[in-house]
Amino acid sequence: MPASETRKNLLRHLPKVDQVLASPEVASLRGRVPILLIKAAVREEIDRTRQMIQAGGITDPAEFTGDVVARRAADRALKGNMPSLRRVINATGVVIHTNLGRSPLPDSAIRQVAMAASGYSTLEYDLEAGKRGSRDDLIEGLLCRVTGAEAATVVNNNAAAVMLVLNTLASGRGAVVSRGELVEIGGSFRIPDVMAASGARLVEVGTTNRTRVEDYRKAIGEDIALLLKVHTSNYRIVGFAEEAEIRDLVELGREKKIPVMVDLGSGCLIDMRVLGLSHQEPTVSDVLDSGVDVVTFSGDKLLGGPQAGIIVGRSDTLERIRKSPMKRALRVGKLTLSALEAVLKAYLEPETAVDRIPTLRMIAADRKAIGQRARRFASRLADLPVRVSLMAGKSKVGGGALPLEELPTVLIALEADGLSAQDLEARLRGQEPPVVGRIVGDRLCLDLRTVPSRELGELERAIRGAVLNAET
């Protein structure tokens, strides 16, 4: 029989949509999966089967009986109904992992977000006065208390914060910045691009590796509205290098009556050396103490909070920023404010902040403690057909912060017969919840620095699922 006739005969055996919908496996999804998703999954599975028959990929009717198609359609519907934004187990050892959502929130912030999301709230309502309030009032006092600023406000991320400040203080005029500070902040977004979008004119001074305060002085003319310093939090220039000190820029700004802005990028509120790190990032308080007019930084990096752009500084400068029409376009909602408030309150107890904020706790974890956890966890995998070994490694802070810091750690290395490291890594990503590790050489490695104790049971189940499924 010609191939075309064979395909026609096979197509006649394709189950109908109504037949698959009525099957027990698909019908059992009603109430758990929206009906439109179920119907779409059934049609897609039948269409996929039809295309495979037409392409010669299926030659036996037993491969697409009603039960087979129903099972595949049910799986498709269940996968289609899963949230796009899913929880994952981060076993990469990268603490502030941009692709995995950056900083996890402390429990106090999670509770406060749930409260704000569950009903109405005082987002813009003054209970004492019984009238409309300002959402800035919810967070400004706390920000001023933990940073020492006169005033503060919050927008949706630090790039927005930088753009808002530039637009307010320097739109249509010049902003002076060192060539060595024209950073790319990720996703191909660059300081010159942000400045262009803000309406400010970029005035570059100095060289890539050496810029002095006199370079800023020479650039100042009638059209200059702002002196900008960008902290290189995601890279370092070492060797034959020099940069203008913030205090010198402040002195120059006061002399010329020009405001000074510092973009800290990944700003921190505590001395990072208490976490056992060798490098100290400038704290927000230290920068404000130098006399600058305005400072911007992220909420979801070293601060350990939600995605936000935080603007602190002099009250007269912040008042101008708050009045900008762009401020409303960039404002944050009640969930961000709730989470940020809880995180900032943790900093009111400096002695316990490291333990209460997951990002700081993971950065501070020492190699010995991680090694002990790794050995205990590895022993739980002894019955599996997988080779488990421990090896020295390095974790990363991540998120464009502290690029020169390497955190000593102990990695759990997994090897399974018949599976490459890439195959095993893909199988772990296919578990629920998915597990993301990293490949070192020819082994899949897991770093428990970024796996909290409450996730170890799920991690073990995921490994078992990935390895045992490989045998079937």
Image (cartoon, rainbow, N blue to C red):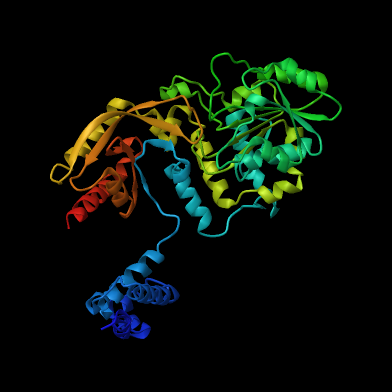
Choose between 370 and 180: the one closer to the eye: 180
Residue 76: x and y in percent read: 36, 68
Q: Which residue is the extreme one toward the front?
A: 2
Check the image and report above or below for 109 versus 449. below
Q: Residue at x 28, y 25 (%)?
A: 368
Look at the image and tell me whether residue 413 can be seen. Answer: yes
Side (left or right) of 182 relative to 204: left
Residue 8: x and y in percent read: 33, 84
Look at the image and tell me whether residue 357 can be seen. Answer: no
Check the image and report above or below for 328 versus 76. above
Choose between 182 and 367: the one closer to the eye: 182
Pick the quarter of the image with the N terminus. bottom left
Check the image and report above or below for 127 versus 232. below
Pick the quarter of the image with the C terminus. bottom left
Q: Which residue is the extreme one toward the right?
A: 222
Residue 4, image quadrant: bottom left
Residue 440, image quadrant: top left
Choose between 192 and 348: the one closer to the eye: 192
